Image (cartoon, rainbow, N blue to C red):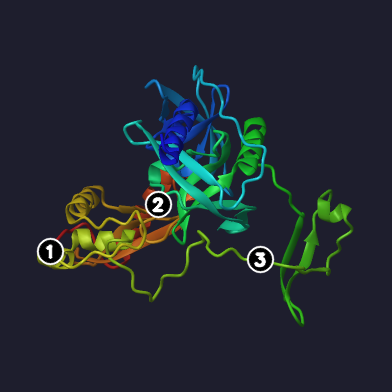
Amino acid sequence: MNELQTLSNQLSDLVASAAPSVVQVQRASGVVYAKDVVLTNARALGREDGLHVRTHDDRQLNAELHGWDPATGLALLRVADLNISPAVPSTEAARVGALAVAIARSWSNSLTASVGIISVIGGPLRTGRGRSIDEVIRTTAPMHEGFAGGAFVDMSGKVIGIATAAAIRGLGVIIPASIAWKTAADLLEHGRIRRGYLGVAGQPARLTDRQGLLIADVKDETPAARAGLLVGDVIVPIEQATASTSVVSVNWLGRRTPVNCTASGKVILAFAPDAVRRRLLSMPLEQATPRTITDVAELEAQLEAVREAGFARTYEELEVGLDAVAAPVRSAEGEIVAALDVSGPSHRLRVEGRHELVDLTKEAAADLSRRLGYRGRRT
């Protein structure tokens, strides 16, 4: 037996031994963290109720969201009668160049794996306004959306991180086990992540060489008060590092975006005259992210659903980490003249008030239509 065959067998044995602790969560994956507790990625959920997991022995069990962390996007599920041994986190620091395997469950609950090397370890990575992950691992292991919440294990089978299925410059993003397990422990104990705060109110202040925060108020019995901060003090940064990417939405006003990548584009396309829609769909469809729909038949089916539901959604189809909802705006004659689009970080729009956001977007679009003179007539 040659060395490559030996390595191949070792990888297969490694995946098989780690597989029981990796479960299917909705259409993605999760890792057994503790007795009857599963750690997953919030993007895998898509909702807060009606959750379930499927195990390696094909049991389907109901799950309850115990808590989640907006900064890391990690969520903790309670699963009664899970009866699976928890995964074991690695206590050693990950090393660039090391071989590792991502393990997940496919949509059919089949075991799926992807091997690669650790390419970059660094951070922080911004994940929203005032939110970040202190450190992330980036790997060459290819990962589709089903890997979100899956295990990233070293060659001993210990977990070195939780997969996100997001990518930065073509490299998959992994949340290190040290961060994931601490987050899970806090969620298990408190149901949320307790983070530090100052207890001040302020406004931006421009100094000679930098921007600062001018304190306008100091709340009693807060860290700021105990530290002796006073109204009129200015807080200034000593050093700041900016991550190479962010899931904070950019301002798309005035920019050209592919019609098949955005929620508003899909609304316009769905309600466009047949001839216009056929002409647009006859052109090459651009792919902005791995989740962009470029298959015409698949897109046509989605557009039919948009017409029936009265709104469109996109999931990281224009920008990784960005979801959106859009609803049509009609003229007085009933023609679709615009679309109202609301976008934001994926981990928030898929968990926090997902259904309410759709309803609010449709109501706001309807209000705009009424202001344009629309009274319920359809073209």
Say whether residue 150 is visible.
yes
Question: What residue does disc 3 label?
Answer: 241
Disc 3 marks which amino acid?
A: Ala
Disc 1 marks which amino acid?
A: Arg
Q: Residues within 10 Å of mark 2 (few under 14, many from 20)?
A: few
Horizontal arrangement in the rendering, residue 330 relative to residue 257 (left or right): left
| Relative image position of residue 345 (x, y in whole percent) | 48, 54
| Relative image position of residue 254 (x, y in whole percent) | 38, 76
Mark sitting earlier along the chain (2/1): 1
Q: Secondary structure at mark 2?
A: helix
| Relative image position of residue 51 (x, y in whole percent) | 42, 31
Horizontal arrangement in the rendering, residue 230 relative to residue 31 (left or right): right
Numbered circles on residues, count: 3
Question: What residue does disc 1 label?
Answer: 278
Q: Which of the two residues, 232 or 295, is positioned nearer the viewer here?
A: 295
Q: Which of the two residues, 287 or 281, is positioned nearer the viewer here?
A: 287
Q: Secondary structure at mark 1?
A: helix
Q: Which of the two residues, 137 or 241, is positioned nearer the viewer here?
A: 137
The residue under the point 48% across, 41% down is 101
Disc 2 marks which amino acid?
A: Leu
Q: Residues within 10 Å of mark 3 (few under 14, many from 20)?
A: few
Mark sitting earlier along the chain (1/3): 3
The residue under the point 38% across, 47% down is 144
Label for residue 51? Answer: none
Q: Quadrant of the C terminus?
A: bottom left
Q: CA distance from mark 1 to mark 3?
A: 47 Å
Label for residue 360? Answer: 2
Q: CA distance from mark 3 to mark 2?
A: 36 Å
Q: CA distance from mark 2 to mark 1?
A: 31 Å
| Relative image position of residue 28 (x, y in whole percent) | 41, 38
Q: Secondary structure at mark 3?
A: loop
